Image: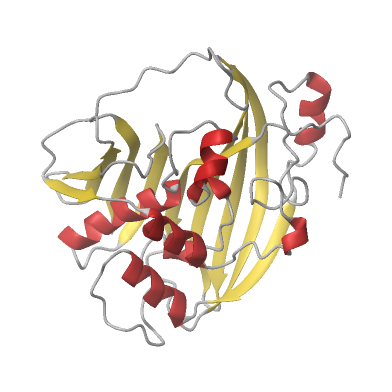
Amino acid sequence: MAAMSSTFTPDARTVDAAQLAHLQTWTGRTETLTDSITAAPVSGLSATLDRDDAAPVPGTALAPLWHWLYFLPQVRHSGLGPDGHPARGGFLPPVPLPRRMWAGGRLRWEENNPLVVGDAVQRVSRIESVTHKAGRTGDLVFVLVKHEISNARGLALTEEHDIVYRAAPQPGDPVPPPTAADTGAPWQRTITPDDVLLFRYSALTFNGHRIHYDRQYVTQVEGYPGLIVHGPLIATLLVDLVRRHVPDARLKSFQFKAVRPTFDLHPFGLNGAPAADGKTVRLWGNDHEGFLTMQGSAALF
């Protein structure tokens, strides 16, 4: 494993050609993890999402996106970086830009092989690409990771995970114009986030990223106005919206993209618009000002 270069500073705003070439040597690296689909995290997330589900037992199907409760990054405390994430390097490349976000993803489930409570599972992850883009407020580095999750019966789920790294904000940085979210969706739900919701989801996913629970850090170091609602939590709530309206729905695929941060300072909206044939659902989130925060779509078997 290549060591982190001494030129990688935690407050960088740019990535030069030599640094990018170094980061791109991570392309093709793989990591294999094993886990067991146990019942306790399922019960915990059900309570966190305010669902009235039956207690999970061996054979209970895992709801879509709830696999994020497993294969957790249980790094020793001494191995954490200043943002609460595992220190840079290791499986993921040591991108020097300080702000790290889950930008989106694409998932595909195997119809005849759902993950269920009691499964012994394996996840093989591969870094597909490391790319660079010059943004208006500094450089952006995108890391694409592909996960394949299998149980004893074979492949169950394929996921592409988009990670984006950004420079720290500076006074005078231009603010990207927001996009107005569509209104009048057939399916709507309002979520009022608070510290407890964000804490419980962070705990369930063993996510130490301080932007979700440390108000002093997120406002004074990363420059945000409040605690950030986890992108995966919003994605999970969007899929949960489908489940609430079509309880027997089984997802074939789901894709989502984070558009704008959601903070814990105000309620936010979840929206769904099913197609006429009932086979696809357009999904999106909006903030209290009516701006688009996440967009996605789900296809059903």
Specify whether 15 is left or right of 142: right
Q: Is residue 254 left or right of residue 284?
A: right
Query: Residue at coordinates 25% horizontally, 69% vertically from top-left?
Result: 51
Total residue callouts: 0
Residue 6, placed above or below residue 273: above
Residue 140: name its quadrant: top right
Q: From the viewer's perspective, is 74 left or right of 17?
A: left
Quarter of the view holding residue 185 = top left
Judge whether residue 11 can be spotted in this image.
yes
Left or right side of 87 for 203:
left
Whether residue 162 is visible, yes or no, is no
Q: Position of residue 120 (x, y in %)?
A: 56, 79
Image quarter in which the C terminus is found = bottom left
In terms of depth relative to the viewer, which is nearer, 276 or 194?
A: 194
In the image, residue 300 lies at what x, y percent?
27, 56
Residue 239 against residue 66 in the figure, above or below: above
| Residue closer to the observer: 189 or 116 | 189
Q: How is the image coloured?
A: secondary structure
Residue 90 horizontal/vertical position (percent): 78, 51
Percent of width and height locating residue 80: 72, 54
Q: Residue at x 44, y 17 (%)?
A: 175
- The image quarter containing residue 295 is top left
Query: Looking at the image, which residue is at 48% across and 84% down?
Result: 118
